[in-house]
Amino acid sequence: MKNLPYYEQKDIENVKKLRRLMEELPPFCKEFFRGIEPRTSSRTRIAYAYDLSVFFDFLKRENPFFAKLDRMEIRLEHMDQLTVTDLEEYMEYLKYRFNDNDQEVTNKERGIMRKISSLKSFYNYFFRCEKLATNPAALVQLPKLHDKEIIRLDVDEVASLLDEVEQGDALTEKQKAFHNRTKLRDLAMLTLLLGTGIRVSECVGLDIQDVDFKNGGIHIHRKGGKEVTVYFGTEVEDALQDYLDERLGMDAMPGSEDALFLSLQRKRISVRSVENLVKKYARLVTPLKKITPHKLRSTYGTNLYRETGDIYLVADVLGHSDVNTTKKHYAALEDERRRSARNAVQLREKPGRP
């Protein structure tokens, strides 16, 4: 797979993982995954497989009928025996349970909603194909979600974060030893994330040839396989250029020859590694905020919206397929702009004004 682009390699790895997960599900589940394959990503199907595994585990543990069956003995027609009450009991079960290793597992609103949404997709597929006579999942009400506070960096925090990445003054002596070897890479990555709003998976998937300094852009693969060019400013260009001068002198390990960002082991850097380095630097600058690569993406979206006031542009640049997703994240800013417009239109001239 070493000659394939990164995103294709990841897709193949995901397909292999999904096949392993499907082997642990009742045989009829394979038909469901084949049916949804054309309109879902491999990552989405893996999430469905995990969620369905939890559901069948619930049936084995909590339902007297299914307790007598081996998981592989469960047939599709058995799904017709379940009622809305059974699925509501499943929602209650998800709040607090034990996994196969007897470890405690809890789910909050969003975790429960995702698992019920997976079950709804499962039932909808077989009901639409007329292989199930009932669809109790369609009658189950999803839990009410409470709005989460959108965490992002303030302007001064962005500057402090990049200063810390560049200088490393607050790092421990042990960290400083590594910092000297990774400073240009770390600065290029964080400047890129903050200056373009790309996802961390899109960042680690970049190859050297994806950077186009002539047109000031990077070529990335969005979720779902869409290819786009995201443009960057001079700050990002300078940071990338400084790092590339260093990167082109490195001998990468086999399979990572084209990768833009390398780990200390000279392999393509992983998503987890980027998450850890963002956490390391952000903790020094703003210890009370839990900053992740996604929060850097939110920071970029906030700054872009404040500068342009164009929610559709923000949605397009961030790669949101539905502008309502963008509006939901930046609702507070929209309200701020609406309030600022309250005196923009003058109805009558005030005395003493020309």
Image (tube, rainbow, N blue to C red):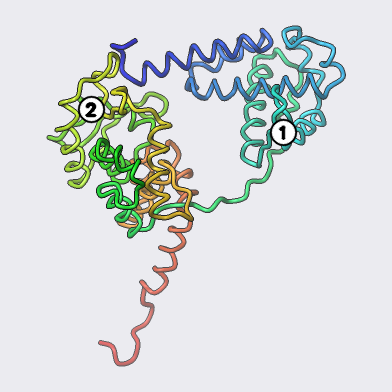
| Left or right position of 176 against 46 | left
* Residue 335, percent from left and from top: 46, 61
* Residue 297, percent from left and from top: 38, 44
- Kind of residue at disc 1: Leu
Choose between 186 and 335: the one closer to the eye: 186
Q: Label 2 crowding class (10 Å Cα cut-off): few <14, some 14-19, many 20+? A: some
Q: Quadrant of residue 24?
A: top right
- How many numbered callouts? 2
Callout 1: helix, strand or loop? helix
Q: Name the residue under label 1.
A: 94
- Relative height, residue 147 to residue 55 (above, below): below
Q: In which quarter of the image is the N terminus?
A: top left
Callout 2: helix, strand or loop? helix
* Residue 319, percent from left and from top: 38, 37
- Kind of residue at disc 2: Asp
- Relative height, residue 237 to residue 351 (above, below): above
| Left or right position of 155 against 289 | left
* Residue 166, percent from left and from top: 25, 47
In the rendering, which numbered label is found on residue 210? 2
- Relative height, residue 342 to residue 2 (above, below): below
